[in-house]
Amino acid sequence: MSIDRDDEDEDEGTATVELAAIMTTASTPVTPGPTSPPLEQPKSSDFVPPTRPSSTPFPNAQQGQTDIRCLTCQPDGPDSEDCMAVSPVSTPTVEQNPRLTLSALPAEIHECVLDHIFGYRVSTTSPSSLNIPSVNARSWSTALRHSRRKELSNLALVSPLWRDLIQQRLYRHIKLKATVRGGNDVMTFFVHHPHLRTYVKHIEVWFPVFQPKFHPTVPGDTSLALPTVSPEGIASATYALPTDNATLEEVFYLVNMTFPEARVMTLEGGERKKAPRVRFSIPGPVTRDLPEVSSIQTLIVKGQWNIIRQPKDWEVISRALPNLEEWHGTYAKPKSKSYLSMAGTLDSLDPKITKLNLCLECDYRREMTCPPYYIKVCEQLHWCEKMAKAASKLEHLSYTGRVCHGFFDVLAKCSNPRTTRLKTIDLTVKNCCRPNAQWNESGSGITDMHFIGAFEQLVLGGIRALQRLKSVELLRIRYVDLDSPVPPLNPYFMIKDGWCSGVWSDEIVTEINRVRPDIRFEEMVESFGDIGYNKDGRLVISPDFPKSRVLSLKLSNYAMLSGGITIL
């Protein structure tokens, strides 16, 4: 019994000593407790992390830096230990993993980002530079008139690199008002910002055709005050001819002195009833030539009747643009004067012009009969012959208006197979001119068999001309009718990259095999679709191509549409 009691006393003493040691070590706030050694956790070699669900915003985990840094702040040095002491996670040193900023990215990445915002940029000398669409349905040509242009301009504050890239896009295409006051404002702005001058590649100048004229509220007040606006509209505003318009001499001087890198110039003459003609030079005792602008290579003239009305006008403009290669001319309204003045201008077309784009009629709708204004043109000259003689000296021709097979007949005669440079011919047909046709046989449309026959002769003339036009790579002839009951049935014919599509007949196929035996039709279909008649005796058609592009249109099938058509 005594032995057991001694053992118990010894055990109690030992426990008391151990408890005191533990309490002394753990409860003292000054002395930290001993750290336990890290335990090596066994890792399974065949462990596969679970995939993130597809509904998450970012299906792929981001592998990289997770801390946010200011791009304008200087990185911390290697001997800076403040951030190392604060961060619970050890980060590599600057030497091992240098910090990447936005400016360190390749130039191609910056260009791709800005192209996604502004739209793609192409060279001003490229044929697609004037009408290339961007991915997001916007183009760099409208950057200054974008609905969020303020936000776009603020992107220039991101970094010095982006400032140059953004300003290049913002000022690539600018539009100016051709008034004396507007020209002075432009000159003043670019004098204060000279680094922006070289960014301008396309300068667009529009001439006002009217200006508001308000009644003075105070006698003797000649200032242009704002009109009185009522719920019924503007009460005190009337319109008169502009009095502050600049001349072409002033416009050319502005472009020459301010925009040394401009390659494309657009002159918009405007359109209104009895519109004023744009003045060429400042009134004076001596008529001076326009200042020379050697950088311009492409000239676009909209509302051309208000700027070029006779061959002499074109000669004056052409002399001022010695390096001009491409000319786009558009008329706002069809009239006989447009055809007659343009016919005289084509006779004196400079050899330096290699690309010509003319739009004499932009009303894409069928007509019941030939209008009187074109009958007046036919009484004086044959327009197709004038255009064919000018086309024989070109490389690219794009035309919208009236044309017939006589164009290709004269073009083939005037072209030398060894020296011809013509590569593309693109014709948009308003109607086929038929000099001896009756009034009820001169219309257009898919239900007019007289027009379909004339269109077939036009296509045959184009195919036969290819025998002498050895360098032609693209031939497109199309008829556009916005009021067509079946738009896919609008006739067209195209040869491109060795393939042929559009209207066909036995005679067309025979001529193609004779002239260009290496060309083949992509598809040759005998019918337009399911055809039947309703109870009223009208033709009913369910086309096989409701939305897709038609590759084959047999001309003989148009005869079924001449009596009217109903679309299901």
Image (tube, rainbow, N blue to C red):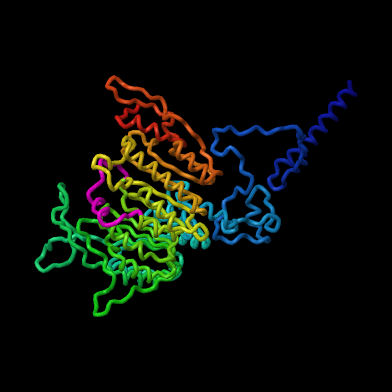
Question: Residue at 66% of width from left, 54% of height from top?
Answer: 84
Report the number of numbered marks: 0
Question: Residue at 29% of width from left, 56% of height from top?
Answer: 381
Query: Whole-percent x and y of residue 422?
Result: 47, 56
Left or right: where 470 falls relative to 187:
right
Does the stretch in magenta take in 313? no
Foreground residue among 39 and 362:
362
Foreground residue among 489 and 100:
489
Left or right: where 62 falls relative to 442:
right
Query: Whole-percent x and y of residue 543?
Result: 40, 29
Foreground residue among 488 and 107:
488
Against 497, residue 548 (above or below) is: above
From this viewpoint, which residue is outermost toward the left? 219
From this viewpoint, which residue is outermost toward the right? 3
Foreground residue among 35 and 84:
84
Is residue 156 visible from the viewing direction of this image?
Answer: no
From this viewpoint, which residue is outermost toward the bottom? 285
Question: Residue at 32% of width from left, 26% of height from top?
Answer: 539
Q: Quarter of the image for the N terminus: give it.
A: top right
Magenta segment boundaries in residue numbering:
364-384
Q: In which quarter of the image is residue 193?
A: bottom left
Query: Whole-percent x and y of residue 177?
Result: 30, 63
Question: Residue at 76% of width from left, 35% of height from top?
Answer: 43
Q: Quarter of the image for the C terminus: give it.
A: top left
Left or right: where 268 falls relative to 467:
left
Is residue 279 visible from the viewing direction of this image?
Answer: yes
Against 352, residue 131 (above or below) is: above
Does the stretch in magenta take in 369? yes
Query: Whole-percent x and y of residue 129?
Result: 46, 56
